[in-house]
Structures are given as C-alpha cells and as structure tokens.
C-alpha cells in the first residue's frame, strides 16, 4: 500500500518529514487508486500546485491529479484518473510514471509510461492539456517505442531542448527538441550498481543532481565529469 509523503531539506542530504502521515493517501476500497499511490510529480502554476501521480487498483495503473496551495494538504480531482489505460492499445495495461509538466505556448505537456502487460513492452507517450485538468494524448502511438523497455523516465528542459534519463538497460540519456521526437544518447554512468527508478535531473548549487531508488531506499547522485570527457550529456549549467 504505497502512499505519498513530504520531506524537506536545506542541503539535499538530510531530510525531515514534517508529519508522520501521508499527504496523499489511497482511495476507498474498489476505487481506481485503492491499492497504491506513488511516483508524484509536482507543477506550480498561477498559485496552485498540481500533483500528478500513479494510482493502482490491483489490476492496472493510471495517472491521477491532486491540487494544493501549501504542498501539505491535497485534494484529488473529481475526474480522476486523468490518463486512463486504453484496452487494445500499446498502453492497455498501464499509464503511469508522469514526468514534470512542460509548458509550451498555451499548452501543457506530460510524458507518461505505458505498457502492453505488466513490466513488459514499456514505452513512453505524450499527452497535452490547455487547462491542466483535461488531458489528451498528443500522438496515438508512443514517442519512444515499447521495445526500449522504459522503466522510468525523468525529463528536464534545458536551454537547447529536453533531456531525459531513463531506467532501462544501461540507463541511457534521451534528447529531444520538441518532446515528440527523441533520440537515445550515451548511458549515464553511476558509481553504484543496481540503480532503480530515477527522478528528473535538477540543477542545484552549480551541479546536476538526480535522486534514484535502490533496495527500497532513496539516494542522491551528483553529475561529475570523467577524466576522458570534457562535457556531460546534460551540459553545464543548462
């Protein structure tokens, strides 16, 4: 029974939970998120925080949304799930792991992971919205093929496009100019084995950082140059 909590930190290493209870709990028995809520992604827009999350009912995972003004008290949207599984399609078993929301003009974009069956044939899709509430798949086909077996996809906008780090074979980087067409880059090299779900990369205190899961614990990694390279896939300060 996975639930979502909040923790705060001033240095990225030491974290404090402001309360001993989840800020987003599972739904009532029989509802679409009755057996787990996880993988939160928060977007701040015009004074409101929008939290996109993966909900599980024991059969499929789908994406829901909740709102807050203080990050501690959240209200699930009445139209949840906002992105449902689609029977007979490439995302028929699962629509989950939402990335951060990206705004381009008057549209908001959200990347998500879809599966044909649990943890098999996992690709990445793209959805858009004009009001942050009603979401539509921008393409009927995935923007990254299910043959890539994407387990998680942490994307970030840089000065010259978008970069994502996926948890898949060798944790490759992905690059895009428009969120629609993605090219696979070189692998991210972690100094620890068995890296699991990865967060979006984020630039903090002059360096790129990423959180990742390993053995049910959360770790932080910092991007460093290697002796044989003059630049990293994310670039410097972008």
Image (cartoon, rainbow, N blue to C red):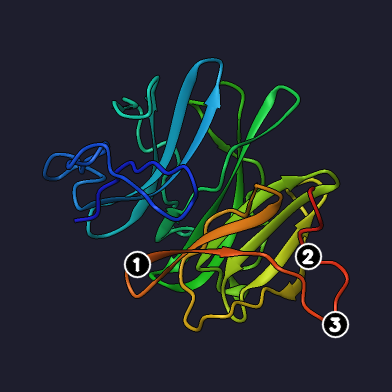
In the displayed structure, does residue 180 sit left or right of residue 80? right
Q: Which of the two discs, 3 and 1, sits closer to the camera?
A: 3
Residue 140 point in image, percent of width and height:
63, 50
Tell me what residue is drawn at x 46 percent, y 26 percent: 49
Q: Alpha-carbon neighbours of circle 3 within 10 Å: few (<14), some, or many (≥20)?
A: few
Q: Is residue 98 above or below residue 73?
A: below
> What is the spatial separation of the Cα atoms under label 3 and label 1, in whole angstroms?
31 Å
Tell me what residue is drawn at x 46 percent, y 72 percent: 196
Confirm or deny contact between disc 1 and disc 2 (CB under 8 A).
no
Q: Is residue 52 above or below residue 74?
A: below
Q: Earlier in the sequence, mark 3 or mark 1?
A: 1
The foreground one among 188 and 18 is: 18
Q: Which of the two discs, 2 and 3, sits closer to the camera?
A: 3
The foreground one among 203 and 136 is: 203
Residue 105 point in image, percent of width and height:
76, 25
Q: Earlier in the sequence, mark 2 or mark 3?
A: 3
According to the picture, the residue beneath numbered tag 2 turns out to be 233
Regarding mark 3 in the picture, which secondary structure is present there?
A: loop
Q: Which mark is residue 217?
A: 1
Q: Alpha-carbon neighbours of circle 2 within 10 Å: few (<14), some, or many (≥20)?
A: some
> What is the spatial separation of the Cα atoms under label 1 and label 2, in whole angstroms?
26 Å
In the displayed structure, does residue 6 sit left or right of residue 194? left
According to the picture, the residue beneath numbered tag 3 turns out to be 228
Regarding mark 2 in the picture, which secondary structure is present there?
A: loop
């Amino acid at each position: 029974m996975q639930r979502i909590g909040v923790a705060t930190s001033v240095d990225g290493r030491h974290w404090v939970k402001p309360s001993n209870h989840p800020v987003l709990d599972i739904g009532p028995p029989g509802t679409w998120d009755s057996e787990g809520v996880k993988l939160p992604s928060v977007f701040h827009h015009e004074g409101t925080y929008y939290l996109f999350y993966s909900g599980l009912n024991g059969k499929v995972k789908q994406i829901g949304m909740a709102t807050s003004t203080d990050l501690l008290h959240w209200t699930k949207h009445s139209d949840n799930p906002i992105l449902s599984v689609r029977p007979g399609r490439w995302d028929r078993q699962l629509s989950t792991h939402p990335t951060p929301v990206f705004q381009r003009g008057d549209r908001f974009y959200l990347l998500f992971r879809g599966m044909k069956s649990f943890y098999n044939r996992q690709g990445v899709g793209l959805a858009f919205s004009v009001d942050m509430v009603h979401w539509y798949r921008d393409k009927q086909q995935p923007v990254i093929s299910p043959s890539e077996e994407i387990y998680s996809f942490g994307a970030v906008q840089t000065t010259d496009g978008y970069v994502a780090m996926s948890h898949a074979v060798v944790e490759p980087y992905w690059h895009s100019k428009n969120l629609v067409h993605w090219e696979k880059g070189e692998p991210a090299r972690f100094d620890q084995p068995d890296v699991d779900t990865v967060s979006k990369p984020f630039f903090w205190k002059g360096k790129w950082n990423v959180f990742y899961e390993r053995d049910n614990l959360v770790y932080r990694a910092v991007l460093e140059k290697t002796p044989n390279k003059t630049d990293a896939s994310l670039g410097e300060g972008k």
